[in-house]
Image (cartoon, rainbow, N blue to C red):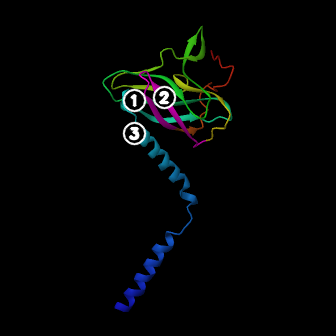
Amino acid sequence: MFMYIRPVCLLAAAVVALSGCGSTAGTAKTTDTVTQSRSTVAAEARPPAGAAAGLSITDPWVKTAEKGMTAAFGTLVNNTDAEVTIVAGASPLSPMIELHEVVDSDGKMIMRPKEGGFVIPPRGTHELRPGGDHIMLMGVAEEVKPGARIPFTLTVKDGQPFEFTAVGKDFAGGKEDYQPGMGHK
């Protein structure tokens, strides 16, 4: 009986060892997704001191674009008992970033800079979405592809930075193309 167990154990060990040598091509997408999820959690877990310490963002993404203009979205979350105001943004992807809103002006929807920035109420949220408030990236010279990881730094009113990474995502949306001529003021 012992002479049969030994070959079976050796065969099982060989199968386990060989399965670890297989191709990783099919797991690249899964690994990227895990890395993206970890980076988002890491950005939320390591905010700087001050007002930004209680700030996080859920589902941050950037609309894919060849070049020119695009926008970033997600939901800002204030985990503090005080109001938090985002007053500026920066990203290596764009030399010029503005905090924008979309409003009705004489029956026409237009984009414009958001006066006073994005205000997140105590223990509340502020949604950044297509057709609403968003982070506008202008002068983008590099293509934003699906799955691209775009770093951002938002500045809180008291000067504290909040860093996160957004993921490139295809979005057809309504009429938003975030290009010159869309009633941008």
CA–CA distance in space, label 3 to label 1: 10 Å
Q: Which amino acid does label 2 sit on?
A: Leu
**Which of the numbered marks, if any, corresponds to residue 41?**
none
Q: Residues within 10 Å of mark 3 (few under 14, many from 20)?
A: some
Q: In which quarter of the image is residue 175?
A: top right
| Label 1: which secondary element | helix
Foreground residue among 5 and 126: 126
Q: Which of marks 1 and 2 is nearer the N terminus?
A: 1
State the extent of the magenta-drawn residues as a range.
Answer: 146-165
How far is mark 2 from mark 3, CA to CA? Answer: 14 Å
Which comes sooner in the sequence, label 2 or label 3? 3
Quadrant of the frame with the C terminus:
top right
Q: Which residue is drawn at 63% across and 17% down?
A: 184
Q: Is residue 5 above or below residue 168?
A: below
Q: Position of residue 35 (x, y in %)?
A: 49, 49
Inspect the image, locate mark 3, and give the three-letter code of the amino acid beneath it.
Answer: Arg
Quarter-of-image position of residue 85: top left
Image quarter hosting the N terminus:
bottom left
Q: In x, y percent, where is residue 83?
A: 36, 21
User: Disc number at residue 46?
Assistant: 3
Q: Is the magenta stretch mostly helix, strand or loop?
A: strand
Q: Do the residues labelled 1 and 2 touch (CB within 8 Å)?
A: yes
Q: Where's residue 154, x and y in %? A: 48, 28
Q: What residue type is labelled 1?
A: Ala
* SS category of the residue bearing label 3: loop
* Residue 154 numbered tag: 2
Question: Between residues 68 and 105, which one lies in front from this camera angle?
Answer: 68
Mark 1, residue position: 52
* Residue appearing at x 58%, y 10% in the figure: 105
From mark 1 to mark 2, how far is it between C-alphas? 9 Å
